[in-house]
C-alpha cells in the first residue's frame, strides 16, 4: 500500500447487487464529505453483481471523477473486495462502508475527528434497524467472537470505519478476515476506538447475510484469528550496536 498520492481520504465500498442504492449513496457521500474535504476518492468494488450495478457505477464515474471502480470477474466475497480497494486506495485515511445505505455517510466526520488520538475509529450501531433474527444472530456472533478472541468489540459487523493508512500496511487478508479488522489492527500495535453511529432500515435490495454466514461460517475464521493472536510475534528493541 505504498502511497505516492496527496489524497487525504479514500472511501472503499464493496458492491454486490445494489443498483438502486448507488445514486443515493453517491449523493450522501458527496454531501457528507463537503464538510470534511474535497480531496478524496470513492472506490466502488463490484463483487460480481448480477443486476445493473455495473452500469450505474460507470454512470457515476462519468458524472463525477472522484468515483472510481473495480469490477471483479465473479463473486469473490467482501474480504476480497476490501483487499482490492485497499490496494487501489491513494488516501492517507481509508474509510469503509457498505452500499446498502444502512450506515450513514454523514457519520464519517464523527469518525475522522477522533483520529487525532486513535489510529482507527470504528462505528457501532447503537440502535439497530434490522429484523429480530438479524439482531439476534449478530449479537450471538459478536459475543462468540469476543469470547474466543479475548476482545471487547461491541459491533464487529458495522461496516463504517476510518483507518489510518499505515494500520493496513502489514495486514494480510484471507477470506472472512474483514470481520476482524479491529483485532488485526490491534495486533499490529495500533489503537482502536468505537463510536456510536446511525443505522437505517434497508429500503431496497436484499441482505446478503443470514445466521448461517454470520455465525457458522465465521467460526472457522475466528479460530484462524485466535491462532494468529496466540502466535503473534511481539517484540521491542531497546538497544542495538
Image (cartoon, grey):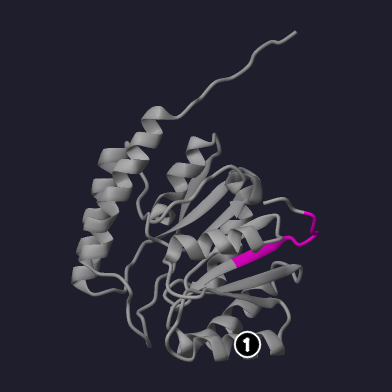
- Label 1 environment density (alpha carbons within 10 Å; few <14, some 14–19, many ≥20): some
Residue occupying image coordinates x 71% and y 10%: 240
Residue occupying image coordinates x 53% and y 52%: 121
For the C terminus, the image quarter is top right
Q: Could you say where residue 147 lies in the image, as x and y percent from the top left?
A: 26, 40
Q: Could you say where residue 70 lies in the image, as x and y percent from the top left?
A: 60, 74
Q: Secondary structure at mark 1?
A: helix
Q: Is residue 9 highlighted in magenta?
A: yes
- For the residue pair 204 and 73, the one nearer the viewer reads as 73
The part of the chain drawn in magenta is: 4-11
Residue occupying image coordinates x 35% and y 79%: 201
Up-down relation of residue 236 to residue 37 (above or below): above
Up-down relation of residue 167 to residue 88 (above or below): above
Up-down relation of residue 128 to residue 144 (above or below): below
| Residue at the extreme front of the image, as rendered | 73
Q: Main secondary structure of the magenta part?
A: loop
Residue occupying image coordinates x 36% and y 81%: 202
Q: Could you say where residue 221 lies in the image, as x and y percent from the top left?
A: 32, 49
Q: Is residue 164 highlighted in magenta?
A: no
Up-down relation of residue 232 to residue 146 (above or below): above
Q: Is residue 47 left or right of residue 39?
A: left
Counting labels gives 1
Quadrant in the rendering for residue 170: top right
Residue labelled with disc 1: 58
Q: Is residue 241 left or right of residue 215?
A: right
Residue 62 in view in this figure = yes
Quadrant in the rendering for residue 216: bottom left
Q: Could you say where residue 228 lies in the image, as x and y percent from the top left?
A: 40, 36
Amino acid at each position: 500500500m505504498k502511497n505516492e498520492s496527496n489524497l487525504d481520504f479514500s472511501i472503499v465500498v464493496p458492491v454486490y447487487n445494489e443498483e438502486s442504492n448507488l445514486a443515493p449513496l453517491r449523493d450522501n457521500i458527496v454531501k457528507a464529505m463537503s464538510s470534511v474535504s474535497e480531496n478524496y476518492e470513492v472506490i466502488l468494488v463490484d463483487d460480481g453483481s448480477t443486476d445493473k450495478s455495473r452500469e450505474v457505477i460507470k454512470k457515476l464515474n462519468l458524472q463525477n471523477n472522484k468515483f472510481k471502480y473495480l469490477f471483479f470477474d465473479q463473486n469473490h466475497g467482501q474480504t476480497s473486495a476490501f483487499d482490492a480497494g485497499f490496494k487501489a486506495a491513494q488516501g492517507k485515511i481509508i474509510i469503509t462502508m457498505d452500499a446498502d445505505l444502512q450506515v450513514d455517510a454523514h457519520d464519517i466526520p464523527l469518525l475522522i475527528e477522533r483520529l487525532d488520538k486513535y489510529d482507527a475509529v470504528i462505528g457501532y450501531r447503537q440502535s439497530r434497524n434490522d429484523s429480530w433474527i438479524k439482531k439476534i444472530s449478530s449479537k450471538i456472533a459478536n459475543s462468540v467472537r469476543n469470547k474466543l478472541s479475548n476482545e471487547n468489540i461491541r459491533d464487529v459487523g458495522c461496516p463504517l470505519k476510518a483507518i489510518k493508512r499505515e494500520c493496513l500496511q502489514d495486514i494480510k487478508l484471507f477470506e472472512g478476515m474483514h470481520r476482524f479488522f479491529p483485532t488485526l489492527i490491534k495486533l499490529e500495535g495500533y489503537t482502536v476506538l468505537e463510536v456510536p453511529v446511525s443505522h437505517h432500515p434497508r429500503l431496497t435490495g436484499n441482505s446478503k447475510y443470514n445466521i448461517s454466514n454470520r455465525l457458522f461460517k465465521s467460526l472457522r475464521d475466528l479460530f484462524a484469528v485466535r491462532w494468529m493472536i496466540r502466535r503473534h510475534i511481539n517484540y521491542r528493541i531497546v538497544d542495538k550496536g
